[in-house]
Amino acid sequence: MKFIVFDLDDTLLCGDCEKEWIKFLARKGMFIDTEHVSILEKFDSDYRKGKLNFHDYSTYILKPLEGLQKEIVEKLTIEFINHSIKSLTDLLTDRLLNDSRSADEVLIASGSHDFLVRGFAHYFEIKSSIGTPVEILNNSYTGKLSGEPTFSDGKVRAVQQWCFNNNLKLDDAIFYSDSINDLPMFEKCGVQIVVNPDENLRKIAIDRSYKIIDRWGNLLVSKIKKNKNFSESEKSEIIQLALSDHVSFSNIKSIYGIGEKDVKELMRKNLKPNSYKSWRKRVRKFSDRRANYK
């Protein structure tokens, strides 16, 4: 029996859905904290160090939902996913989803809040999902949790209960995650696949002989091209990588063997003029904020 458990953020997705959710709400005027970008970056930094105060994080993320009816949040979630799906998915997302089609059971288990995890699971046509439970009273969100966060050991307990309810064993699972916070899950599952790990998690994965997938490495393209005579499908893949806010020019070079100048030329020849100008503007904008972008 093939049983797969996916983490969501930075694993099945190529970014953090809750960070993008807050940005989405801010653009709609539903989140008025002007410091939300820097605050989210601090939460993200603490998370990657394994030091996240989940109560503080959850309170911040859920504040805009307080008093909103369940149906309104559902509509917002659908709008958000349709708006952000291109920037939050990539070639690896497609390959993981394609691989999961042959599985007998697939579960998304994430520390992100349940309404978002459930929304992405529905979009990906995955019937089962677990997320941090959010309280709903009298058909309205309270801005509070209704149970234990599905984070670190809490995720293990939630998945174990789900397995018990579905007559499955966690030690039969193939588990994919990017996060050092998921070490308790890795230790309980039968097969461990670490996706694009940071330095600390990579060391642990190597020491324990976990399989490692580098998001922009050999999984995507098995052979570096030494010439520039790309097929149409290869050009399409390069364009998808270049359009992603999560892929640098150095990532593309490591896969296809072409540098920034050649990527820009390929984009110029294959995109419509206005699309090319918009892409270059976005690259410059992000480069001003992040030294390692593009």
Image (spheres, rainbow, N blue to C red):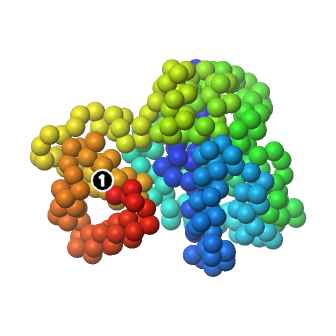
Q: 13 above or below 152?
A: below
The three-letter amino acid code for the residue at tag 1 is Phe
Say left or right for 237 vs 153: left
Residue at the image point whose x is 63% and y is 76% from the top: 34
**Residue pointed to by mark 1:** 249
Query: Which of 174 and 40 lies nearest the eye of the viewer?
Result: 40
Seen as rendered, the residue at the extreme right is: 138
Q: 105 above or below 126?
A: above
Query: Which of 230 and 254 lies nearest the eye of the viewer?
Result: 254
Quadrant, the N terminus: top right
> x, y (%) of residue 88?
48, 55
> x, y (%) of residue 61?
70, 62
Quarter of the image where one finds residue 137: bottom right
Crowdedness of circle 1 by 10 Å Cα count: few (<14), some, many (20+)?
Answer: some
> x, y (%) of residue 126?
58, 42
Quarter of the image where one finds residue 44: bottom right
> x, y (%) of residue 111?
68, 46
Callout 1: SS: helix
Quadrant, the C terminus: bottom left
Residue at the image point whose x is 58% and y is 56% from the top: 17
Say left or right for 177 vs 271: right
